Amino acid sequence: MPPHPSASGLLEVNDHHIRDIAVHIVNIPAKAVHSHGSGDVAGIHSVLLEVTTDSGITGWGEASPWPVFTGTVEANAAALHVHLRPYLIGADPIQVEQHLATANKIVVGCSEAKAALETALLDITGQICGLPIAELLGGRHRDSVPLSFSVANPDFDANMEEVERAWADGIRILKVKAGFADHDFDLMRLEKLRARFGDAVSLRVDYNQGLTAYDAIRRLRDLEAFKPDFIEQPVKMHERAALAEITRAIDTPIMADESVFGPYDAFFAAHDRIADIFSLKIMKAGGIRRALEVAAIARIAGLEVYGGCMFETGIAHAAGAHLVGAIPDLALGCEFYQCTHYAEADILAEPFPATDGSVHVPTKPGLGVTVNRGMMEKYRVETLC
Ligand SMILES: [Mg+2]
């Protein structure tokens, strides 16, 4: 919807109020089970947030929890429907920071629900102003970001067929999910991937907390022969002292994922230098703006950041794409491959813009994607409204 010119000719943005909020729970099966150091995942179980205004604008957001990592679908759906919806009805959707501050007073935790809320409000604000979210955040630093595909199928032969398809699509970054089987299985996969693709591939390794701290360093030293760009979250999220020790002992850069959720974690993680890189995720930080704060702390501390995600549809991936488009420094790419290469289908009307091995930052106003309601209905488990 175009902005309203006021009598003075200035942009009138106060003429919008939240009329309704619907919370849709969807379950989209994956093409194959993916294994991680913290468990198996067989699909995308997400909460989609639909916010409509009395001026006829619809904004979308998504909360994508992973119970062993962040939280549950049930808790996030309840946070949005039971606790935040009554406060938000009638509110001005543009006052994003005010609503996020109030949401933090109404519900502790549930960072994924707050990410969903922020995405939907920024989607509406962007449509009112005629600007993509990346521009609302201060403007994009890049139009596209190299895409990583995760090597996580416990059936490695079947996995290599997926990898070859990803390679044919232009993907040149592979992240090997490790620590769910034995150490030799992890080394074998790295050896075969390096032999198959040579130096043309960027290899990374993510343990998802799968190693025990007492013998992690000697195992990680074995990986360095395969020249990974980084090694991600080898030990448990709260074993920060061990993570710092590993970061000092291993030449390969170490990335914190589960150990760094939002700005508060990032501040102390940077102060104690527990890692060389932070994985940014809107689901951990509680939205794009909080993730930008994590990125700012990293930048000040001389750390790198990476565009991470959970198991998401194209809605959350689009929000993540705006985030990584707006970060000043981003050297390691992103991993928004789920809705294109992992799920059996997505719920967007047009395919999520991941082509030629990169994610392209949406250019239409707001989130820049629209939902295919038929596909959402197909995978919808429940709607709370
Ligand atoms: Mg990770």
Image: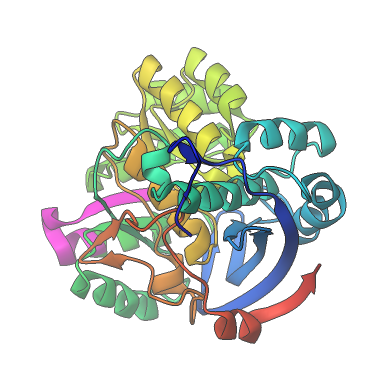
Above or below for 290 versus 179:
above
In the image, farthest residue toward the front: 7
Residue at (51%, 69%) from the top-left corner?
34
Above or below for 309 versus 156:
above
Res. 178 in view: no
Foreground residue, 194 or 381? 381
Q: How is the image coloured?
A: rainbow
Instruction: Return the x and y of residue 139 as percentages of the image width and height.
Output: 32, 37
Foreground residue, 38 or 324? 324
Q: Magenta stretch containing residue 378, yes or no?
A: no
Quarter of the view holding residue 382? bottom right
Above or below for 365 versus 134:
below
In the image, farthest residue toward the left: 199
Residue at (74%, 58%) from the top-left corner?
19
- The span shown in magenta is 193-207
Quarter of the view holding residue 138? top left
In this rendering, would 314 be left or right of 373? left
In this rendering, would 362 be left or right of 69? left
Q: Quadrant of the C terminus?
A: bottom right
Residue at (51%, 62%) from the top-left corner?
315
Instruction: Return the x and y of residue 242 as percentages of the image width and height.
Output: 55, 26
Q: Magenta stretch containing residue 198, yes or no?
A: yes
In this rendering, would 287 be left or right of 10? right
Instruction: Return the x and y of residue 149 as percentages of the image width and height.
Output: 35, 62
Foreground residue, 313 or 373? 373
